[in-house]
Image (cartoon, rainbow, N blue to C red):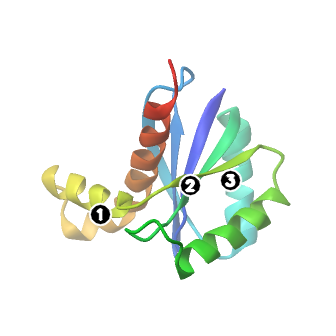
Amino acid sequence: MRILAIDHGTKRMGIAISDELKTIAQPVEFIPAEPFVEFLARLKILLRDKEVDLILVGMPRNMDGSYGPAALKVQDFVAALRGAVTVPLKMWDERLTSVQANRFLIEAGVRRDQRKGKVDKTAAAILLQSYLDSLPH
């Protein structure tokens, strides 16, 4: 069984998945956030095909640890997901994952016009890897 991570965005949701041993995160794709029904349909296919037993959702926090407007959107998103899927959900601190993802892609030589499609799934992989690294092995 695997863990699927979602980097929530208003336009795109970045998706990453763990290996079966839950040690390595790998970016998968991004799914347009709207319409939500289509996002949900694609997510359910991934959950089934990848045999996911936990969904990890990035919770944006301010640098001081407080929650802002983006966190409220994620809480609403998680509430909607809970009503739509049977896989357990967990939220995880995602501070600076998009910044790290952009920096990584720039260092990897990815052109600006190609980064947009890759930053979300890369941020999801960074989020997931931080969670995997926190697990006892």
Q: Position of residue 112 (x, y in %)?
A: 21, 69
Comes first in the chain, label 3 or label 2: 2
Please tell me how crowded label 3 is: few (under 14), some (14-19), or many (20+) other residues with Cα within 10 Å. Answer: some
Residue at (71%, 48%) from the top-left corner? 89
Return the residue at label 3. 43
Gap in angstroms between the C-alphas marked 3 and 2: 10 Å
Q: Are marks 1 and 2 in contact (CB under 8 Å)?
A: no
Disc 1 marks which amino acid? Val
Return the residue at label 1. 99
- Front in this rendered view, residue 50 or 19: 19
Gap in angstroms between the C-alphas marked 1 and 2: 16 Å
Residue at (62%, 31%) from the top-left corner? 2
Return the residue at label 2. 6
Query: With 88 as the anchor, is 30 left or right in this view?
Result: left
Residue at (51%, 69%) from the top-left corner? 12
Q: Are marks 3 and 2 in contact (CB under 8 Å)?
A: yes
Q: Position of residue 107 (x, y in %)?
A: 14, 52
Gap in angstroms between the C-alphas marked 3 and 1: 25 Å
Disc 2 marks which amino acid? Ile
Disc 3 marks which amino acid? Leu
- The part of the image, by quadrant, that contains residue 21 is top right
* Up/down of 17 relative to 35, above or below: above
Image quadrant in which the N terminus is located:
top right
- Front in this rendered view, residue 62 or 101: 62
Q: Give the structural element (helix, strand or loop) at label 2.
A: strand
Please tell me how crowded label 2 is: few (under 14), some (14-19), or many (20+) other residues with Cα within 10 Å. Answer: many
